[in-house]
Structures are given as structure tokens and as C-alpha cells.
Amino acid sequence: MAKHLLRILNRLVSLAVALALLGAGAYSAYALWDNSRVYAAAENVQADMLKLKPTLSADGTEDDASFAELRTINPDVCAWLTLDNTKIDYPVLQGEDNLEYVNTDVYGNFALAGSIFLDASNDSRFGDTYNLLYGHHMDASRMFGDLDLYKEKQFFEDNTTGVLMMPGKAYHLEIFACLVVTASEENIFEPARWQDDITGLLDFAGEHALFQHADVISALRTADSPKILAMSTCSTEFTDARTILLARMQPIERLK
């Protein structure tokens, strides 16, 4: 009798183990499928948006008419960001608060990939001295995933340019610092601190950057009307880590 009960118990244990492994396998398969669905959705939205990417007019400013179709899709579209030699090439939105586009795409649909968006406290026309963008960190170069590239010294040294376009104007971007900070870093995540004087921000960048272009920082210190664009995404160095890329904004017409 005891041997019979032992055999039954062994079979029950084996069955439980088999069911647990089957459940784990099913969950893993679902997770892979769900992850691929999230990335596919992000890729599809970007492909759609790239067909509507604004163009620069002959004088180097953005052609206002080219934003019209984007704004019929979503009036919260305020700009278009491109970083050269990356896949960061997206419309920029601005919500009523900084949660609105965390998990919402440009069509207004729920999407884990969210959107690239401007801090709600910033001027939607980028009239501020310090402007802050957010985007999810995603693999396969989606959203702000390619900000990781700038944490490689050679890439940072070789790739310093981008463009920020908005209705009627455009800015050349000159990347000057890459940092890793906490999500609570006031020097980065409180745009109001730097609207009158960016000296403290430049000091912070100079002291804490992984890599920097000191000549650009020096030029910003003496510029009459300096403007900075910050780009933020999640990072894995530690809990609540954020990768930050800082770029100087220069009106394109001044560069001609």
C-alpha cells in the first residue's frame, strides 16, 4: 500500500512539474508574441509618420504647409525631431501633462511605445531657453532607444548633428553632452530652472557628462540667446537611471 501511494505521489509531482513547465513555456511564448506586437506597432506608426515628415523650404526654414496633415491627425504635434545616423526620426507631441503621451501614440491610441513628447511646462513653439523631450527606451532602435549609441565614445565623437523642425522655423542641433542621471535629477528634469540663465546647467553637464564637446559648451556660455534641447530616456545602469543627450539649438537660417 505504501509503495502504491508513493507511486501516485510521484506521478502527481511529475504532473505538477510538467504543468508548471507548460505554463512557463506558454507564458514565455505569450511574452515574446506580445513584445513583438509592441515593436511592430511602433514600427508601423513610424513608417506612417515618415510619409508625412515635414520638409525644409528653400530658405532653410520649415514649410508651414507640410505640418498641416500631421496636425489633422493630432493637433498636439508641435515639432519633428531627426538625429542624423540614428533611427530617431519622429513627430514630437505635447500633452496637457507629462503622462498623456507616455502610452499614447500620435493617433491618440493606447500604445506601450508611447510617443516622443515635449515637457508640458515648455513652450510648444520651443521659445524657451531649455527644452526637454521624453521618449521610451526600446530595442531595435525604436523611439529613443538609439540614445544609447551616444554612450559609445566613438559614436559620440563622430555624430553631432540633427534637426528640429516646427511650423515656420527649424533648428540645427549640435550635440554637446551625454549623461546618465537619476530620474529625480533637478538639473535635468526641472526646465524652469534654466529659462533665464543656463550657466548652472552647463556647469553640471561639464562635471557629470560621460562625454562632452567642450568647445560647444564654451560657445553656449558666451552666446547672446542660447537655446538647449535635452532628450531623455530610461537606462539600465542603476534603478531609475536616465540617459540624457544635450544639444545646442541654432536657427538654421543663421547657419547659411
Image: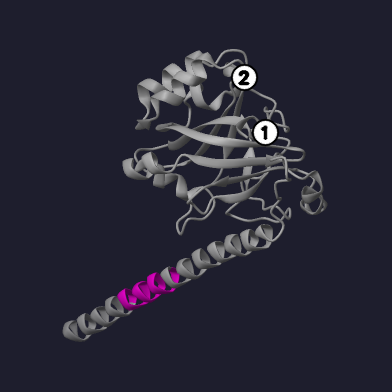
Residue at left 59%, top 36%?
Answer: 172
Near-viewer residue (208 or 29):
208
Residue at left 76%, top 40%?
Answer: 167
Does residue 224 appear left or right of residue 186 in this picture? right
Q: Position of residue 81 (x, y in %)?
A: 61, 44
Q: Give the magenta part as a residue range.
A: 16-27
* Residue neighbourhood size for the residue with mark 2, other residues' Cα within 10 Å, grouped as few (<14), some (14–19), many (≥20): some
Residue 192 circle label = 2
Q: Is residue 99 at all visible to an observer of this figure?
A: no
Q: Is residue 221 at all visible to an observer of this figure?
A: yes
Q: Quadrant of the C terminus?
A: top right
User: Given the current orientation, which residue lies at the most extreme front position?
Assistant: 256
Residue 166 circle label = none
When the figure is inspected, residue 256 is found, relative to residue 6, above or below; the finding is above
Magenta span includes 156: no
* Residue neighbourhood size for the residue with mark 1, other residues' Cα within 10 Å, grouped as few (<14), some (14–19), many (≥20): few
For the residue marked with disc 1, what is the amino acid? Answer: Glu
Q: Position of residue 51 (x, y in %)?
A: 69, 61
Q: Nearer the viewer, mark 1 or mark 2?
A: 1
User: Given the current orientation, which residue lies at the most extreme left position?
Assistant: 3
For label 1, the residue is 253
For the residue marked with disc 2, what is the amino acid? Answer: Ala
Residue at left 68%, top 58%?
Answer: 49
Q: Earlier in the sequence, mark 1 or mark 2?
A: 2
Near-viewer residue (160 or 120):
160
Pointers 1 and 2 in contact (C-beta within 8 Å): no
Q: Position of residue 188 (x, y in %)?
A: 51, 26
Tell me how far mark 1 sits from mark 2, CA to CA: 27 Å
Mark 2 secondary-structure assignment = helix
Mark 1 secondary-structure assignment = helix
Look at the magenta stretch and give its main secondary structure.
helix
